[in-house]
Structures are given as structure tokens and as C-alpha cells.
Amino acid sequence: MEPFSAANSATVTAGAPRVGAPGTTDRHVLVAVAWPYANGLSHLGHIAGCYLPADIFARYHRIVGNRALMVSGTDAHGTPITVLADQEGVSPAEIVERFNPRFQEQWERLGVSFDLFTTTMTDNHREVTGDIFRGLKEHGYLEARTTDQMYDPEAGRFLPDRYVEGTCPFCSAADARGDQCDSCGKTLDPVDLIDPRSKLTGATPEARPTEHLFILLSELQDEVLAYLESREGWRNHVINWALGFVKDGLHDRAVTRDISWGVPVPDDLGLADADSKRVYVWFEAVIGYLSAAKEWAQRTGDPEAWRAWWEDPTADSFYFIGKDNIPFHAVYWPAQLMGSPSLNLPTNVPANQYVTFKGAKASKSLGVGRAVLDYLEVFGADELRYGLTTNLPEYNDVDLTDGELVRRVNDELVATWGNLVNRVLAMTQKNFDGEVPAPGPLDEQDEALLATVDARLAAEADLLEQVELRRALKEAMAGAQAANVYLNAREPWQTAKTDRERTATTLWTALQAIAGLNVALAPFLPFSAAKLHGWLGLEPTMAGAGWQRPEVTAGTELASPTPLFAKVELPEDDAEA
């Protein structure tokens, strides 16, 4: 299976560098994105939850010139995959092989610019997982214990946590899983469930003894708490959940399971019957961020390049996830890194809340929320990205409708930004033969517009650094609104009849503003930004050009304009719904 990377696709990297392309600053930023289970295509909840925010953030840093590395991959070992494989009577590997190419397709079509999108089935991932195990063992944070695990007497096998369902002991939700209750967010153990039942047969599972490796989280609790208390700028729902989780007490947790699918347990750790066990996926999947960085480095021809993001204390690392993954990324993963030291801890975990559809949380397993590829049959990629960004669930759950997406695109993106670009380029084409006119002296109104665009760019950069993406997009669109106000006040369609120099100055000023606003919108709208960048006769790539308004030189020949965006019309059945 060929891992997906930015080097494989010109489409996915509009506005982004190729694998191995150098940045222009010394700042290294790791953009670590949640690994999707290979049991179904991503829906809008997934995209708005972590993948689109991560891409916007990474694209911004690439334009600035920072060395952004964005990695993720298909989680091949999650229990939902084995559940689906059991249902279909196929191997888990076949499920992964089926869905991984579709993931690659959706990233390409939506413009999610991974530097590497791989899988947890690689030899590299197995080796890196083994290294983390050995680091924990060496530092005294791993030990073998005999414990009870749920066993299905009808199926004749031990059950992974997600194969056990029952009533949550904390909130009484009837559909809690053996690892976590989605209703209250509590992390669980299958033996905690009330009235447990096997997902395989419906039988009541029995607790039977088995030996496993445990990570000694209780001994890392004080260190994790001190780390969390030192965090600044984290979203309240993330830091409060993580702190509450740790203050309730960290319990030692098994990192192996009696299953046949997953990363093999290293045989040099003193675990009896290690061949029949596999690494527990909660422990192994997060290691993928490190293994993917190492794989990326190997693919660039510099196997040690990953160290700049993982061992340099000045590097930053941002983990983009949904809120149900907060404990695993803000508590457990830092604990794993502390127990196997010398690697950087997360700088920030900007987890989003949920996207819901008529109040129901989007879910692949429950069939709530359509796949993103379905939406791309109706929306252009940039149009869909815009509609989702205006509704990102950064601090609260967002109930999303197709009608809201359409309204945002038609009333804002097309009417404000697309219309501005089209009419300025069209007037330049008509009055100055498609060349950027030489301006006369700028007056206060001209200077004010350019100052406004520059100020919006600066304010937007501050917000992007804080992962405040919705507010950052509002700054950019406010600049577009200001340009429209300027244009309506100057009326170049009228002055073209009486004052050619004034018209030239107005259109030159508007073109400079558009060039700056295109930079501001590029992280959100990479396809149209790359197109417009070319229309304005600017450099072929925006990566490393800097977060600033570029100058569109007088005399530059502009491309003949076509609409950047088209209004969206829902199919009749969807519109009625």
C-alpha cells in the first residue's frame, strides 16, 4: 500500500510545499491530525472536527515560511475495523485496503495537504511502537500483571473493550462501550459496565484472568498534572476536562490485549505468551504521530529530519482531534512521552466540539451525517471548506444543516469575495486592456483601504496562531467587505467615462487589496487562491512568500477573469428535506 503524501498529488498541495521543501524560517511546527478508523469514509463532523482545521493551520504556517509538518494516517487496528470485518466475514486488512484509497481521494479532492498520510500497518510503525515500549520498560513505567478480562463463552475468545457494551456506571447510558461512554465522556473498563453483553454473540461475558503489560500511569500522575497546569492558551473545555481527568486519579492501564489483529507485542519485555497478544490500540495509535514523522523523514532521504520536530525544545506541536479524544491526547499521550523521555510534549491540543445533524452527533457507525465525498458532488472544494469553516465547533457543538452551508457560500463567499474579484478584474480588462494600470497619487481613501487590508492580515495572523480559525476567517472577509465599500464609493465604472487617472488609481488600489486578501484567504480557500494568485501574475507558489500583501506591479498582464465560485443549488430532494 503506497502511503499518501503531498509529493504524490499536485491537487492536494495547492499553496503548499512538496515533501522536503525547505521553509524560510527556523520555526518547526508539527501538525498532528487524528487517525481515522478504516471502517467508513469521513463525514462532515470529522472534517470540521479536525481535518479542515489542521489543514488551515498548516497552510498558514507554510505561507509564513515556517517548517510545518502535517502527518496522519489510517488507524488500521481500531476495534470498529475488526467489528466490520467480522460482520462481512473478511480480514481486517481487507477493510483497511478498501478504505485507505478512498481516504486519499477525499483528501485530494478537499485539498487537505498532508505531508504524509500513511497507515499503522507499516513495519516502521511497529518498530517505533516497540521503541516506546522499551523506553517505558527501561524507565520503570511498564510491568506485567495478571488481570481479569471479559471473555465470551459462546465465541470462545477474549473480547476487546469495544466488543463489550452495557450500561454506564456513571450516567446510566444504555449503550456505553467497554472503553468509553460517549454520553458522559468517562473512560471505562469493560468490568465496570452494568449488565455487560458481548457485541459478538449477545452473551453475558465472563471475567477471566490473563496476563498483560500495564503502563504505570499512577506514578506519572504528578508529572502530567504539572504539565497541564503549565499550559497557556488551551481551550477551556480541553484543559478543564484534562485537569479534571487527572485530578480524579490516573490508574495503571493495560497496554496489551488478547486479540489477533494489531501490532505484535515485542517479545523482549517479559510478557508470557506474547505471541498471542497484540498492542492495545489506544496506546499504539497515538504513537503514529511519531512513526509517521519518521517515515516522512525516510521518504525525503534524510532519515534524521524528524528530530527537528520531536527533539528540539523550540519546536511546536499541535494535535487536532475531536473532543472525545481529549483524554488520549492531553493526558495519556503526554504520559507515554514522559515515561519514554527526550521527546517533545504537545504544545496545544485544540480539540473541537461536535458537529450534530438535527441534534444527533455525526457518526460513521450510526450512519448520522453523510460522507464528505457526497457533498463534493454538489459543492466545490473551496465552497465546502468555506461553509464548514464558518461553522467550526471550536467552543460549542454546532448543529449543521445543508441549507446553512448553502447560505454561507451564496450570500457571503460568492456575493462578497467572488463578486469583488470578478468585477475588479473585469473592469481592468475592459478599461486597461487587462494590464494593471499605473496609479496616480494615492489619496486618504486609497491609503485607508490598503491599511485596512494590512491590519486585517496582522489581526488574522494573531488569531491563526491561537487556532481561532472562525474569527480569523471573519477578519479576512471583513477586509473583502471593506474593499467592496471602497469600490462602491469610488465608482470606477462611472469615473472611467470622465477621469482615466482616477479610475487607474482606484483599480490599482483594489488589485493590491485583492492580492492581500487572497493571502488572507489562502489557508481556507487553497484552490481558488492558487488560481487567483496566477491571474494576478504573482509567483507560482505562495509557500514561504510571507504573511503580507504582495505588490501587483503596474504593467502586469492579468488573466481574463472567470467566476471564482459558482452559487450552490441543492438537489431538489435535499432542498425539500
Image (cartoon, rainbow, N blue to C red):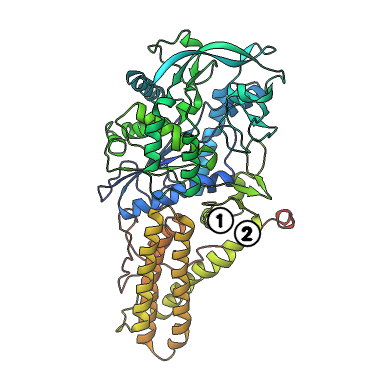
**Secondary-structure class at tag 2:** helix
Residue, disc 1: 391
Q: Give the vertical position of 258 relative to 1 (above or below).
A: above
The reply to whether the C-beta atoms of the residues labelled 2 and 1 are less than 8 Å apart is: yes
Q: On the image, which quarter does residue 153 sit in?
A: top right
Q: Is residue 134 left or right of residue 182?
A: left
Which image quadrant is residue 33 in? Answer: top left
Q: Quadrant of the C terminus?
A: bottom right
Q: Position of residue 206 (x, y in %)?
A: 65, 14
Amino acid type assigned to the residue bearing label 2 in the image? Glu
Question: Callout 2: few (<14), some (14-19), or many (20+) C-alpha neighbours within 10 Å?
Answer: some
Disc 1 marks a residue whose amino acid type is Asn
The correct choice, above or below, for 226 with respect to 212 in the image is: below
Q: Is residue 53 visible?
A: yes
For disc 2, the marked residue is 404
* Position of residue 555 measured from the top left corner of the image (x, y, whole percent): 31, 73
At horizontal 48% and vertical 74% (from top left) the residue drawn is: 423
Of residues 286 and 498, the one nearer the viewer is 286
Marks 2 and 1, how far apart at CA: 9 Å
Crowd around label 1: few <14 · some 14–19 · many ≥20 (10 Å): some
Q: Position of residue 74 (x, y in %)?
A: 49, 33
Taking depth in this image into account, of 452 and 104 the one nearest to the observer is 452
**Secondary structure beneath label 1:** loop
The residue furthest top is 272
Tell whether 224 sits left or right of 281. Answer: left
The nearer-to-camera label among 2 and 1 is 1
Q: Is residue 565 above or below residue 78?
A: below
- Residue 292 in view: no
